[in-house]
Amino acid sequence: MKLDYKILHFETTESTNQIAEEEVFRNRPAEFTVFYTDFQTKGKGVGSNTWYSNRAENLLLSIVLYPDFLNPADQFLINKIVSLGVCQCLSEFIPQRNCFIKWPNDIWIDFGKIAGILSRNTIMGNQFETCIVGIGLNVNQINFSPDLPNPVSMAQIAGHPFDRDQVLHSLIQRIAYYYNLLKINDLKEIDQQYLEKLLYFNSKATFIADGNEFEGIIRGLDQFGLLLVEKDQRINKYDLKEITLKINQ
Ligand code: BTN
């Protein structure tokens, strides 16, 4: 499959998600237009978090999608295919390590966070309008602020730096591959690969919910992307704000 995509590069911007959103609103750029920057002054993370990244060391990008074929109730599927695309890209450049999807939107390697995904969807009535997929991938940064929880980069793992453009192009192609699987509705393949990559799937893990720490087993996700956790032979559903997964190193 030949993918046409356009990369718009900015030396500095507040946030690629922000400029992508503005541009979608103003000019509706083609699907797979990529807003890519060397440095963000207001990089956004999940919730009220900030995404920090040294200048020109990592990948900071937002991809514009128009998944109008998708039922808004299934929007978590976008998150799944993007996570799979990031994992495939990482397997190409650092095949010596397995990477995992830490639900709902982190990519982990060696008990460290190597990438984060922040999507912003626009839905009108029952119709999916736009999806801006923001991705921060740690490529060449070696020194991280001690305030960040467990960051890790491709260069730290491999012991050498990478060509960011090469990683960027691979990343876009990989995401496009999985986006196409979504278009042709191959949900079985997507779900199977997702569960293979899901951190702690079918194994015991420690969680915190309602202020209580407990042991449970991740049994998968429901249609809406809620996490299914088994505890005392009962399966409970959680959304992001309700549960924290503790990483046992
Ligand atoms: C997370 O909190 O894990 C998600 C981080 C997402 C960061 C990326 S960097 C490119 C894009 N622009 C932003 O402001 N955030 C996303």
Image (tube, rainbow, N blue to C red):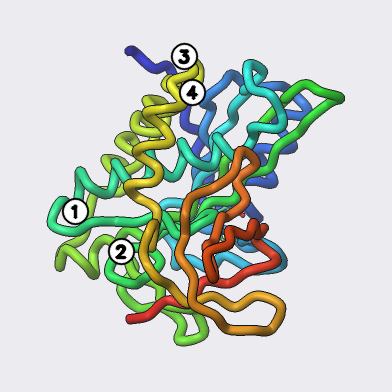
Q: Where is residue 136 shown, x and y percent of the image? A: 48, 54
Query: Which quarter of the rendered picture does the N terminus lie within?
Result: top left
Query: Which quarter of the rendered picture does the C terminus lie within?
Result: bottom left
Q: Which dot, 1 or 2, sits closer to the camera? A: 2
Please tell me whether mark 1 sits on a helix, a strand or a loop. Answer: loop
Q: Kindly check if marks 2 and 4 are in contact, taking CB atoms under 8 A apart as contact.
A: no
Tag 1 residue: 94
Residue 57 occupies quadrant: bottom left
Q: Which of 21 and 66 is in front in this view?
A: 66
Q: Where is residue 224 shown, x and y percent of the image? A: 65, 41
Q: Which of 168 and 243 is in front in this view?
A: 243
Tag 4 residue: 182
Q: Residue at x 33, y 34 (%)?
A: 169
Image height check: is 67 above or below 246?
above
Q: Kindly check if marks 3 and 2 are in contact, taking CB atoms under 8 A apart as contact.
A: no
Q: What residue type is labelled 3?
A: Ile
Taking the image in four quarters, ligand 1 sits in the one at: bottom right
Measure how far apart labels 2 and 4 are at the Cα level: 25 Å
* Residue 57 shows up from this direction: no
Tag 3 residue: 184
Measure how far apart labels 1 and 2 are at the Cα level: 10 Å
Q: Which residue is drawn at 58% across and 58% down?
A: 235
Tag 2 residue: 109
Q: Which dot, 2 or 4, sits closer to the camera? A: 4
Q: How crowded is mark 4: few (under 14 residues within 10 Å), some or many (20 or more)?
A: many
Relative to 121, is 139 on the left or the right? left
Q: Which amino acid does label 1 sit on?
A: Ile
